[in-house]
Amino acid sequence: MNMLEIRHLSKRFGDKVVLDDLNLVVEEENIFGFIGRNGAGKTTTMKIILGLLEADSGEVYVCGEKVQYGSAKTNRLIGYLPDVPEFYGYMNAREYLRLCGELSGMDKEEIKSRSKELLEMVGLLKEKGKIKGYSRGMKQRLGIAQALMKHPKLLICDEPTSALDPLGRKDILSILSKVQDETSVIFSTHILSDVEKICRNVAILEKGNIVMQGNVNDIRLRHTSGDICIVPERLSDLDAIANLTGGAVVDDKVIVPPANSGSSAMSAVLSKLADSGIDLLKIEQMEPDLDQLFMEVIGK
Amino acid sequence: MTESKAYLKKEWLEFKRTHRLLAFCILFAVFAILGPATAKLTPLLLEAFQADLETQGMQLVISEPVAMDSYMQFFKNLPILLIIVIILFSGSFTGEFTKGTGVLMLTKGLSKRKMLFTKYILWMLTTLGGIFLYLAIFMGYTAYYFKLTNLGGFFAAAGIYLIYIWFWLSLLLLMSVIIKSAGIVILGMGAVYFILSLIAIIPNAEHYLPTGLSQGVVFVADPTVIKDFLPAILITCCLNIVLIIASALLVPRKEV
């Protein structure tokens, strides 16, 4: 079943087109990365999915149910974690989760056991103080707990790690990895290393449209340039290697482009170098990381 | 209904923990004590200055204070309390969106309409509670200092003033929907008061305006005047209903 389906979604603010005929399908899965730079339209898309913002045109379906602007009906299926969640500072974590549970129509016992379970998972079980005294990381962890309170089918996280320090980011990624067994997660971010760590599938949003979508490993393979990187033991051998392979010297290595190498040509390069008697530290077929792919896709 | 009940519990907790309940109790009680005390002490203060004033050629005729002087103080202090109430509640709804706390409530299935009207119920109940506290303490002190008179007129005037307070809370409801920040909500309320005051300059216009309901002690002194203000009572009640309906229709489209 499709957890989320977006059809021909468009939205503009004044003259600025934020979403331009956006189409996206997210199937039932673990963690789906929704990547885009700041201002690409990620938060706008999320708000439309939550019925908090009205689209100019297009339709959004959550678990097959159509999202209506201003109606909270489909939100019973969704848990939402904003980039900087804001809570009622005069409450403590348990009181806040009780409020969330009561709003979701859960009974007292269920609220009690679920709150305990979630607070334990996010490491706030022993925290008795008021939320106003929480650090940003603690608020983000409580944000995950509140989003999961009613066992949502879909958890939408809007840049949950953007405002956190490395330790806080690590905590959040670890918690998201844990929750993927009970709910599908859409993880919106511009921090690509976070996506590489926890997402199986991704979509890249640029100028209001999806410019690339698929499995992270498949995308990497499809975009493998075929370049071969050779690092000699002695820097004085760099020119000799370049001459032999037809590559170019870049810093302390030689890069052999696909025209001269190609994925099937690795053995030919290896045999040329073996005959030359040059000692090598490393030779490898280069794979682009998500950062390079992202830059390539958005044309930077 | 479940959502509204849960949210009302949260609103009450907020009212208590952000010390608004304490502020309400102290303010309403202090003003309730001040009214009769001022009525009782003013002639004594004037007596103290009488000698000085007479040497300057001014003749003071000081009459014995009566319950009516205390009633006058009751209605004089009500607008101050109303302004405080409006300031305390001005950011209640808009704040949920400017601070971002309301978004998480909406994503739990609470509609904007339920959020707004739950707040409105709390505004009404707490203000009514405050007014009753004010009235109870005031009556106690007035009965202690003076012989109670004109009680029928006093309670009729107080009842009419409640409709006037209801009008401002209903206006606050609509302003909270159409305006984004608390500061601008207060300015908007001020602008409406200014416009109503301008219209009231027209002879007899106050018989048709919500502001006409704030006559207070005029009604106590002569309850027969109330019949001239029946159109204002009717128009204000109708306006309140219009304000409530308009808020209910507009709030789902409020930007988050």
Image (cartoon, helix red, strand yellow):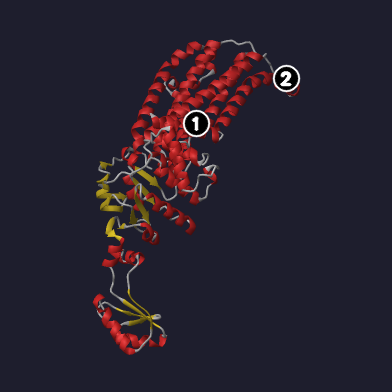
Provide the residue designation for mark 2: B47
Q: B210 or B105, which is in the foreground?
A: B105
Q: Are marks 1 and 2 on the same chain?
A: yes
- Vertical placement of residue B185 versus A209, above or below: above
Provide the residue designation for mark 1: B12
Helix, strand or loop at disc 2? helix
- Is residue A76 found left or right of A141 in the rendered image? left
- Whether residue A131 is visible, yes or no, is yes
Q: Position of residue B233 (x, y in %)?
A: 42, 19
Helix, strand or loop at disc 1? helix
Q: A239 or B173, which is in the foreground?
A: A239
Query: How crowded is the residue under tag 2: few (<14 C-alpha within 10 Å), some, or many (20+)?
Result: some
Picture quadrant of residue B180: top left
Label number found at residue B244 = none
Picture quadrant of residue A212: bottom left
Question: Where does the C terminus of chain B fall, quadrant-wise?
Answer: top left
